[in-house]
Each structure stands twice: as structure tokens, then as C-alpha cells.
Image: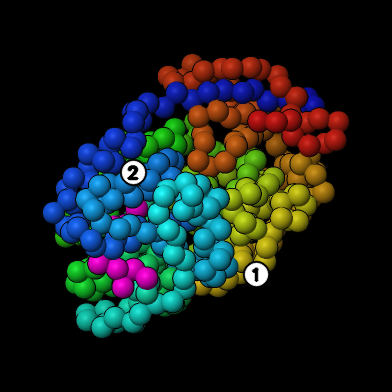
Amino acid sequence: MNGYHLTKIKQHFKDNSLVNIKDEVSKELIKLHPLIKPGATVALAVGSRGIRNLADVVKAAAEFIMKNRAYPFIIPAMGSHGGATADGQAEILAGYGITEKNTGVPVRSSMEVVELPDGDSSNPVFFDKNAYESDGVILINRIKPHTDFHGKYESGLVKMSVIGLGKERQASNIHRYGAYGLATLMPLTAKQIMSTGKILGGIALVENACDETMLVKVLRADEFFDQEPVLLEISRRNMPSFPVDDIDVLIIDQMGKDISGVGMDTNIIGRIKIAGQEEPVKPSIKSIVVLDLTANSHGNAIGIGLSDVITKKLFDKIDFPSTYTNVITSNFLERAKVPIVAGNDKGAFEIALRSCGYLEEGEVRIIRIKDTLHLDEMYISQSIADKIKNSEGIELICENINMFNRGNEFNPF
């Protein structure tokens, strides 16, 4: 590979991001004005994903509620994340800037739940105790294709009302049924939760291929089931992708819970690794290397099993109790299995390259990305550069870049 020299490119995705997020949230929240009564307590349910502008959205929602002379507070709605502890979940929110100091409203983190009547649901139904004791709940979440399954409702408000608000008890109950639990039981459970009247509505966020907020839509609870599939399709159409479908080695600089629920977006890397779930046809990637774990993951490295090689740098940051709590709750154990651990970046890359078998000189297809949220800038090998150099939306930034420093680590992205 001529000393591991790659070409840096920029993919120009459609820029349809919103300019003033807080204004958009405030305008949309007017739809819920009749439901927010003076003196009422309103729980703002917030998840554990690395959603763009999340702190701004939460703050705008809190300010709107206070202007209506009601009393908002924030609750984590994130299932078993944060080690399934109240402190761990509050710490995750704090990592996103969602604290009482920053938002002006209290954060009430607890793993306590109340059990609701089952109704038509074939499984127990649980609900965050603090949320249940409030006068109403507003969910805040991103609508996006899920990393475990595909169905009418994937990552979004419906799922958050069940897995998020039900804390570890509900997450464990739904996930024990595998993908069937998520695709089939989750919507049924959500309908039972909606029947309580506790959910006032939700703030649905859709992001574009540049990882920017492109759409804010406030839905009443009775609109979730009709409108969320529409938003999911918009999200799917605006997801980023690689410029080619066949890759020998994919190098990912960082993975983490703030990147995706399983560290790396399975819709991007084309790997699911769930028994009974069909693997995506594309992209086809022979070997995946992951170099590091984000700080906002707090040691939760669920998803490492989707890769083939990791570095010791990443391995040393893994909090196994937190990771195992998350993966055991999900029931998809393959995703927490530790792959080959290499001493440094170069060693990890060379192991991955060797695992691809014999490759013709000059035909090696390599891509390096920062993470699966950011595919606008990447490094590519010459064989890929030759194939896409005249493609629309591709800008060549710099050629023949040496990837490694003297310490056999990748140069900064």
C-alpha cells in the first residue's frame, strides 16, 4: 500500500439543516398548549443517544412549559443504559449538558417503575414512577432506522414510550423476545401505555446525512402511530452512505453509545449479528477495525462484537459491568463479544487487512471514517478514488496522505 497512503475526500450531502432549533421547537410546541394546564407538573423524557442539539431542544421545551405556568422536570428514558442505575443515567444526561444548572429545571433520575394493567399486551407493562406521578409526559427523541430490526416503528417516540419509560424492567421484558418483541410487542405495549392518558405528546427530531437537525415535529400522543412511520421514511431517505458498496477494510476511529445504540450504526456498516435477522446485502465489508471508545459512552462498549479488530486503547476503556448490563438486557449477546485486540492502530489495521485474504496490489479497497454518524469526510484507498473521482458530490481534498505517525497510531482525522 505504499506506506499506507490514502486520499481524503468530502461527500457533499444535501444541506437541509434547520437554522434556529429552539425557535422551531417553540413554534411546534404550541400544538400541545391546550394540554398543559397551569400548575401542572410535566415530565420531559430524554434518552441516551447522541442527538444533535438535544440540550437546546430540552431547554426550549422546559421554557415553553414554564411560560404556560406549569412545572417541568427531566427524567432519563433510556431502559437499561447507564448500568441500569439512577446515578448512571443522570450522568449520561449530564454528559449531554442536560443538568438542572443548564436547563433551569430539576433532573429526577430513578429506576423505580409502576406496573400498569396489561390490556391487550401479552407482557407486563411498566412506567417510570416519577413520570407516572406527574400530570403528563412529553417525550423527546430522534426518529431513525433501528440498529436491531426493521418495522413500522423503529427508533423514535413509540419505542421510547415503552423501552425508555419502562426502564430496565420493561427493556428486559421486551428484549427477551428478541426482534419479535421489538417489532411486534413494542407497538402493542405502547398502545396500552398511551391508553393511560399520561403521554401528552412528543418532540420528534429527524437528522440529515450531515448529522444535523433537519426537521422538528411535535406530535400529540394520538398522532404517534400514524405520523411516526412518515417521519421514519424521511429519516431513511436522508441517511448518509459510503460512496461504494464493496469494502475490504473499514477503519472506524471511534464508536460509542452517543454515536449509536450499539456503538456503530448497523444500517451504515451492513452488519446486524442477531440470530434470525437477515444481514443487509450492502455494504459488503470484509473486515472492520475500531480504534477508540467515546467518552460519552461511559465505558459502555456494546457493539464491539460487530467489529473484527479493536485496539488495546479501546479495550482498556471498556466498563464490562455496564456493557454486559446493556447487552444482557437486549439479549443480543454477540454484540458484546470481544474481537481481536491489537497493541496499536497500525497493528489493528494490518491484522484486518491480512484477514481479507489475497488482494491484488493496487486493488485494495480501504475506507477510514471518524464514526458512523459522520460520513461526509473520509479517507479512501487509490482503487476507490479511481472509481469515484468523477462522481457527483465527491470533492477530493488531499491525495497521498500518510496515515500513521512514528508511534504507529493513525494521524488525527
As for residue 138 lying within the magenta part, the answer is: yes
Nearer the viewer's eye, disc 2 or disc 1?
A: 2
Residue 69 picture location, percent across and down: 23, 53
Which residue type does callout 1 highlight? Pro
User: Relative to 396, does residue 57 appear above or below in the rendering?
Assistant: below
Q: Residue at x 43, y 45 (%)?
A: 55
Mark closest to the chain's N terminus, 2 or 1: 2
Color scheme of the displayed model:
rainbow
Residue 74 picture location, percent across and down: 40, 58
Residue 384 picture location, percent across and down: 58, 27
Q: Residue at x 80, y 27 (%)?
A: 3
Give the extent of the magenta segment: 130-140
Question: In the image shown, does 328 or 99 lie closer to the viewer?
Answer: 99
Which residue type does callout 2 highlight? Ala
Q: Residue at x 61, y 59 (%)?
A: 300
Q: Residue at x 55, y 50 (%)?
A: 95
Does 256 sit left or right of 17 as displayed? right
Question: In the image shown, does 343 or 380 lie closer to the viewer?
Answer: 343
Does 372 sit left or right of 201 as displayed? right
Secondary element at tag 1? helix
Q: Quadrant of the C terminus?
A: top right
Does 242 sit left or right of 28 as displayed? right
Residue 285 appears in the figure: yes
As for residue 361 lying within the magenta part, the answer is: no
Number of residues whose C-alpha sits closer than 10 Å to that of mark 1, classed few (under 14), some (14–19) or many (20 or more): few
Q: Please tell me how many numbered marks the rendered image carries.
A: 2
Residue at the far left: name it: 34
Q: Quadrant of the N terminus?
A: top right
Identify the mark at residue 321; answer none if there is no mark: 1
Does 197 sit left or right of 108 as displayed? left
Identify the mark at residue 60; answer none if there is no mark: 2
Secondary element at tag 2? helix
